Image (tube, helix red, strand yellow):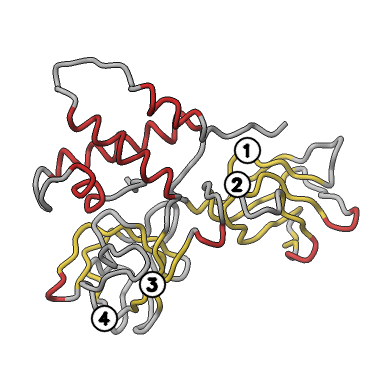
């Protein structure tokens, strides 16, 4: 599964060398991600999906979403694709989308509306995806290839100071998401899982840009603390979730829109 934080970050957080106990650390990251998303009631790693949502007959001009919508791709009402100019995304402050209005007093006709896009929460949608600074070197990257060739796998990200590519990262090429399993810096190769999180593996041309998902910093920090706690917890012991972790996830809970 895709995780909020990755192995490189957890190794550094705990203070152990890269490559040590990777299996247990990965399991801890997966468990932490699952519990954080379950208890918060929202996704922090996006998925692509098309969801059919019912229209409220009392307010036919507004469509309430049952999940955070990070990025709207298309909206289809009664077989017709509605243009972005006819829609207002709410709220408009950069947070995840919770409702969609038909602009200029329009109304949805339904009975359901198909909403296609990237579902997940980020405090600033504009920062959710960041350029990796690298491109595909496969000629081309076929739909079945699991080795992604890049220009410089060993490069350092100028903003975070971390390696450009790390095991556990979620990458986006076009409309496809990929998960990084391993990085071979000397060969400029990434071993990846194709077509994850509701997307489909497709062919991509050489030179296509590669974006990275940039999870919210506070959620990454929470995932690392949670995973470290799970990793250090004795296998035979049952322990209550620490108060600071419980409080942090409560603060991230989604407010249900009714």
Q: Distance from label 1 to label 3 (Cα)?
A: 30 Å
| Residue tagged 3 | 210
| Residue tagged 4 | 151
Count of picture labels: 4
Between 249 and 42, the one lying in front of the other is: 249
| Residue tagged 1 | 66
Asked if the residue at tag 1 contacts the one at tag 2, i.e. Cβ–Cβ closer than 8 Å, the answer is: yes
**Is tag 2's residue or tag 4's residue first in the polypeptide sequence?**
2
Residue 120 at x, y percent in the picture? 52, 47
Q: Nearer the viewer, mark 2 or mark 3?
A: 3
**Is tag 2's residue or tag 3's residue first in the polypeptide sequence?**
2
Q: Nearer the viewer, mark 2 or mark 1?
A: 1
**Is tag 4's residue or tag 1's residue first in the polypeptide sequence?**
1
Look at the numbered disc 2 and give the secondary structure of its residue.
strand
Between 180 and 122, the one lying in front of the other is: 122
What is the number of the mark on residue 110? none
What is the number of the mark on residue 51? 2
**Is tag 2's residue or tag 1's residue first in the polypeptide sequence?**
2
Q: Residue at x 38, y 21 (%)?
A: 243
Quarter occupied by residue 207: bottom left
């Amino acid at each position: 599964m895709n995780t909020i934080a990755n192995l490189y970050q957890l190794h550094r957080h705990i203070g152990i060398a890269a490559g040590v106990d990777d299996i247990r650390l990965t399991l801890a990251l997966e468990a932490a991600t699952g519990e954080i998303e379950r208890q918060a009631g929202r996704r922090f790693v996006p998925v692509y999906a098309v969801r059919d949502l019912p229209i409220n007959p009392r307010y036919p001009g507004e469509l309430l979403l049952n999940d955070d919508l990070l990025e709207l791709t298309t909206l289809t009402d009664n077989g017709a694709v509605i243009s972005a100019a006819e829609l207002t995304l709410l709220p408009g402050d950069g947070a995840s989308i919770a409702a969609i209005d038909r602009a200029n007093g329009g109304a949805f006709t339904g009975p359901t509306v198909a909403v296609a896009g990237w579902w997940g929460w980020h405090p600033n949608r504009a920062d959710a995806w960041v350029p990796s600074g690298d491109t595909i070197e496969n000629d081309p990257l076929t739909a079945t290839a699991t080795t992604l060739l890049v220009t410089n796998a060993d490069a350092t990200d100028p903003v975070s100071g971390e390696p450009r590519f790390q095991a556990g990262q979620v990458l986006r090429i076009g409309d496809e998401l990929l998960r990084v399993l391993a990085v071979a810096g000397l060969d400029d190769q990434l071993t990846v899982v194709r077509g994850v999180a509701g997307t489909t593996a497709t062919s991509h041309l050489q030179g296509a840009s590669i974006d990275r998902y940039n999870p919210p910093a506070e959620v990454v920090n929470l995932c690392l603390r949670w995973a470290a706690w799970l990793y250090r917890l004795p296998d035979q012991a049952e322990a209550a979730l620490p108060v600071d972790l419980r409080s942090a996830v409560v603060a991230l809970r989604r407010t249900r829109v009714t």
